[in-house]
């Protein structure tokens, strides 16, 4: 399953953010959005950990084009977190060619995959939104060259029966 790097379209946020106390965990079944080349028959799993103003997006091992890759943990800043939902957004404006690391080591294969799908220059905002009332998850990108949903999913709150292995 493709590495998860993206986030859902998020506009006009007017709500206040409440800081989270202890770590909050959500276990999610996700599908790469059809607009990003995914199908309903290719589900993946991620664990979302909320630690203060930091969202940890933890993926288990995954396969891309028949090659196995180790799981990863991505840190994403949270801008809204309350009893209704969570919004995490980060942005990028660069002409640099992306270099991808997997568990702290450069990965030429993953860098080539990422480079082939990204515009240059890259001016984009990535958003992750989680509706805590019903567990709906959306991940997407808004950029100067595209607006696209990347992942869609359903999440449940609580500890995973088999937690992903990657460390923070």
Image (cartoon, grey):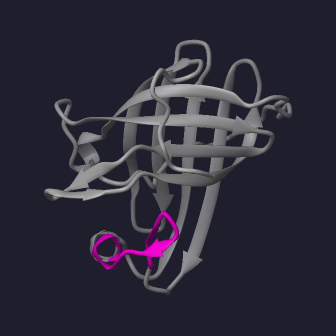
- Which residue is depicted at the point 56% across and 47% down? 127
Quick check: 30 left or right of 81? left
The image shows residue 68, relative to residue 21, as above or below, that is below
For the image shown, how many numbered marks are present on the structure? Answer: 0
Residue 118 place in picture, x, y as percent? 36, 71
Q: Is residue 120 magenta?
A: no
Residue 96 seen in the figure: yes
Closer to the camera in the image, 16 or 156: 156
Closer to the camera in the image, 12 or 129: 129
Residue lying farthest to the top in this orientation: 133
Quick check: 136 left or right of 13? left
**What segment carries the magenta color?**
99-111
Q: Is residue 104 magenta?
A: yes
- Which residue is depicted at the point 70% across and 19% down? 84
Closer to the camera in the image, 27 or 132: 27
Residue 31 sits in quarter: top left
- Which residue is depicted at the point 24% across and 52% down? 63
- Which residue is depicted at the point 46% across and 82% down? 121
Quick check: 151 left or right of 20? left
Residue 166 place in picture, x, y as percent? 51, 49
The image shows residue 165, relative to residue 81, as above or below, that is below
Residue lying farthest to the bottom in this orientation: 96
Closer to the camera in the image, 161 or 1: 161
Quick check: 75 left or right of 149? right
Residue 111 place in picture, x, y as percent? 35, 75
Residue 112 sits in quarter: bottom left
Residue 154 place in picture, x, y as percent? 43, 22
């Amino acid at each position: 399953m493709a590495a998860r790097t993206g986030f859902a379209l998020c506009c006009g946020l007017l709500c206040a953010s409440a800081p989270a106390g202890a770590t909050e965990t959500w276990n999610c079944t996700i599908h790469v959005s059809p607009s990003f080349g995914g199908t309903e028959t290719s589900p993946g799993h991620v664990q979302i950990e909320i630690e203060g103003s930091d969202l940890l997006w933890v993926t288990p091992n995954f396969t891309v084009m028949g090659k196995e890759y180790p799981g990863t943990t991505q840190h994403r800043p949270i801008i809204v977190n309350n009893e209704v939902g969570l919004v995490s957004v980060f942005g990028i404006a660069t002409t640099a060619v992306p270099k991808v690391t997997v568990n702290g080591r450069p990965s030429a294969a993953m860098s080539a995959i990422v480079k082939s799908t990204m515009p240059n220059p890259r001016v984009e905002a990535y958003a992750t939104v989680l509706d805590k009332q019903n567990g709906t998850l959306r991940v997407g990108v808004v950029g100067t060259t595209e607006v696209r949903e990347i992942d869609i999913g359903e999440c449940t709150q609580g500890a995973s029966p088999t937690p992903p292995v990657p460390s923070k």
